[in-house]
Amino acid sequence: MPSWIEDLRYSVEIFSEAGTLEQVLGRLHDLEASRPAYAIAVPKHPGRVVMLCRKAQILKGSDRKE
């Protein structure tokens, strides 16, 4: 893989009530940085479904119990 291609496998995303992706708030390289980004995004978007994803896998969701 060329060195200029970023490997941003984690993302913080907002979904609609219907379950469709509305906005990607950020993409990050590592899990240690993506967890605080998710934690900040949840209270900034009350009533919205915010998810922390690794590619297509959902790691955390504001609509899910921990």
Image (spheres, rainbow, N blue to C red):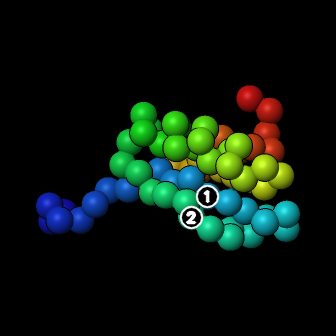
- Asked if 32 appears above or below 18 in the picture, the reply is above
**What percent of the width, then of the height, locates residue 47?**
83, 52
Give the side of residue 6 with respect to residue 2, left or right.
right
Q: Residue at x 45, y 57 (%)?
A: 27
Between discs 2 and 1, the one toward the N terminus: 1
Q: Quadrant of the C terminus?
A: top right
Q: In which quadrant of the rendered view does residue 21 lie?
A: bottom right
**What percent of the width, then of the height, locates residue 10?**
47, 50
Q: In which quadrant of the rendered view does residue 22 lie?
A: bottom right
Asked if the residues shown at circle 2 and circle 1 are in contact, with their CB atoms under 8 angstroms apart, the answer is yes
User: Dot 1 corresponds to which residue?
Assistant: 13
Local secondary structure at mark 1: strand
Q: Quadrant of the N terminus?
A: bottom left
Task: Identify which residue, 5 or 41, lies in the foreground.
Answer: 41
Spatial CA span between label 2 and label 1? 4 Å
Q: In which quadrant of the rendered view does residue 24 lie?
A: bottom right
**What percent of the width, then of the height, locates residue 41?**
62, 47
Marker disc for residue 24: 2
Q: Residue at x 17, y 65 (%)?
A: 4
Amino acid type at image mark 2: Val
**Which residue is the extreme one toward the front?**
44
Marker disc for residue 32: none
Amino acid type at image mark 1: Glu
Dot 2 crowding, Cα within 10 Å, few <14, some 14–19, many 20+: few
State whether residue 59 appears in this view.
Answer: no
Local secondary structure at mark 2: strand
**What percent of the width, then of the height, locates residue 64?**
79, 39
